[in-house]
Image (cartoon, rainbow, N blue to C red):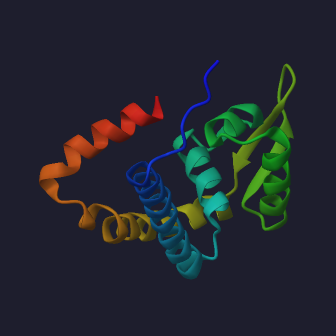
């Protein structure tokens, strides 16, 4: 088996630009949501998935959608339960169902417009309309 050669300077530059851009946009969007609503990025991710899932999801399904290990999600949900944003209940047939509370629904309703404005400001407004379709296709291909 041959050992791959190290990345070239151009390859490293592209890799670092990709990482830094994604981290920067996510951080800025998360900061705006936190400043306006007090929700962290993980809070927002969980609340929107629950809201989009008719207010409830099985905990394992939620973990999978977040790309998280069960224990990480469990710790996050414990913090969110303490703040009254979600509730967990045993599900029929085993497992746990996570439910959005009224406070959680109110919080996500306040956060969605902040999220939309921040995404437009930090990402969409900086991508020329003529390149959006190509960028979307490339990102979707990379995510496969």
Depth check: 7 or 108 in front? 7
> Residue 101's spot in the image, x, y percent?
70, 56
Q: Quadrant of residue 98?
A: top right
Please tell me which residue lies in front, 9 or 33. Answer: 9
State whether residue 88 is above or below residue 90. Answer: below
- Apparent side of residue 36 relative to residue 78 in the rendered image (left or right): left
Q: Position of residue 17 (x, y in %)?
A: 42, 60
88 horizontally vs 12: left or right = right
Residue sitting at x 18%, y 50%: 131
- Count of marks overlaid on the render: 0
Q: Residue at x 42, y 48 (%)?
A: 11
Residue name at image x 83 percent, y 24 percent: 92
| Residue in front for this viewpoint, 133 or 85 | 133
Q: Percent position (x, y) of residue 56?
A: 66, 40
Taking 2 as reference, is 14 above or below it?
below
Q: Residue at x 61, y 63 (%)?
A: 41
Q: Is residue 42 left or right of residue 59?
A: left
Q: x, y percentage for residue 2?
A: 61, 23
Q: Quadrant of the N terminus?
A: top right
Residue at the bottom extreme, as displayed: 35
Residue 64, by quadrant, is: top right
């Amino acid at each position: 088996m041959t050992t791959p050669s190290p990345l070239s300077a151009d390859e490293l530059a592209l890799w670092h630009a990709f990482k830094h851009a994604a981290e920067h946009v996510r951080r800025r969007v998360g900061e705006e949501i936190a400043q306006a609503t007090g929700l962290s990025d993980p809070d927002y991710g969980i609340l929107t998935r629950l809201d989009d899932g008719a207010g409830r999801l099985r905990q394992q399904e939620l973990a999978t959608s977040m790309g998280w290990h069960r224990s990480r999600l469990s710790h996050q949900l414990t913090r969110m339960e303490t703040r009254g944003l979600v509730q967990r209940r045993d599900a029929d047939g085993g497992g746990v169902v996570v439910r959005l509370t009224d406070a959680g629904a109110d919080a996500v309703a306040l956060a969605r417009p902040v999220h939309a404005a921040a995404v437009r400001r930090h990402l969409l407004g900086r991508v020329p309309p003529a390149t959006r379709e190509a960028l979307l296709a490339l990102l979707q291909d990379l995510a496969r």
